[in-house]
Every structure is written in structure tokens, then in C-alpha cells.
Amino acid sequence: MLIAGFIIGLGAVTVIDIHGFLGRKSSYWSEATTRTHKVTKPLIWVGIILILIGSLLIYAPSLLYWQLGIIALLIINGLFLSFRVSPYLLKREEQGLSTKILSAEWQRKIMISMILSDIGWWSSVVLLCYHLSSVT
């Protein structure tokens, strides 16, 4: 379950991060990002849930606490993306503005969120690698 969570969630995060990065300066990629996030958003949530369940099954308490902290960060970040950024992007799409490049303020917020997301997901991968290397 844990590895499936990484495949699904981190794969979706990578796709949307690349789209978002390209969309900073390109109207084509800005629109592509809006459309792509409709698919990646639920996949990221599925990944988080699978990582949570998998972590509860395999980690000893000391590593589990670290993992739960990372998951909490991912959930808080995901709530911001799902309930602030996503509705904003969908509203822009309805208004025919999805090809317009986002304002500097929104780009900054999304960039911070992307960095937190990447730190969280990759820290979780490092934690899994540490766990696997310490299992005898």
C-alpha cells in the first residue's frame, strides 16, 4: 500500500508540478495545468491515504511519528490546494480565463505550496528508504 501510494501520489505531484512550472510563463501550459489538476488532485489524495494506511502497517512508532508529521503537512497543503487554488482555477476556466497567466501573487502562493509538497513527498520517500535499509 505504501509503495502504491508513492507511485500514485508522487507521480501525480510530479506531473502537476511540471505543468505548473511551465504554466508560469506560458498561456498554453497555464490552461493545460488547469485541466490536468482535475485528474492529479484526486490521485494525490489517494496517494496520501495509501501512504497513511501503509505507514500504520509497517513503521515502528518512532518512524511512524515522523511519517504522521509529514502526512499532516501534506494534508494541510492539500487542503489549501483543493479548497483555495482549485476553485480559483476552475472559476477562471468558467470565465474563459484559463489561458491567462496567473498573477504574481497566485504564482507565489502556488510555488510555496509546490515546494512544501515536494519536501513532504520526498522526505517521506527518504523515510521509507531509511526504514528499508534498517530492517534486518
Image: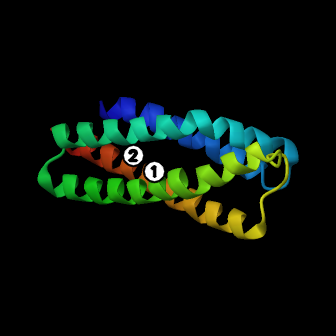
Q: Residue at (83%, 44%) from the top-left corner?
A: 96
Residue 129 in percent (x, y) is at 33, 44
Q: Residue at (24%, 38%) from the top-left corner?
A: 53
Residue 105 higher or lower than 22, as above or below: below
Residue 114 in percent (x, y) is at 58, 57
Is disc 2 placed on a helix, strand or loop? Answer: helix
- Which kind of residue does numbered mark 1 sit on? Trp
Q: Residues within 10 Å of mark 1 (few under 14, many from 20)?
A: some
Residue 93 visible within the image = yes
Q: How is the image coloured?
A: rainbow
Number of marks: 2
Q: Nearer the viewer, residue 4 or 90?
A: 90
Residue farthest front in this picture: 95
Q: Residue at (60%, 55%) from the top-left corner?
A: 85
Residue 43 in percent (x, y) is at 48, 34
Provide the residue designation for mark 1: 122
Confirm or deny contact between disc 2 and disc 1 (CB under 8 A): yes
Q: Residue at (69%, 64%) from the top-left corner?
A: 106
Determine which of the numbered discs, if any, sits on residue 13 in the image: none
Is disc 1 placed on a helix, strand or loop? Answer: helix
Quadrant in the rendering for residue 84:
bottom right
Position of the C terminus by quadrant: top left
Alpha carbons under labels 2 and 1: distance apart: 5 Å
Provide the residue designation for mark 2: 125
Quadrant in the rendering for residue 123:
bottom left
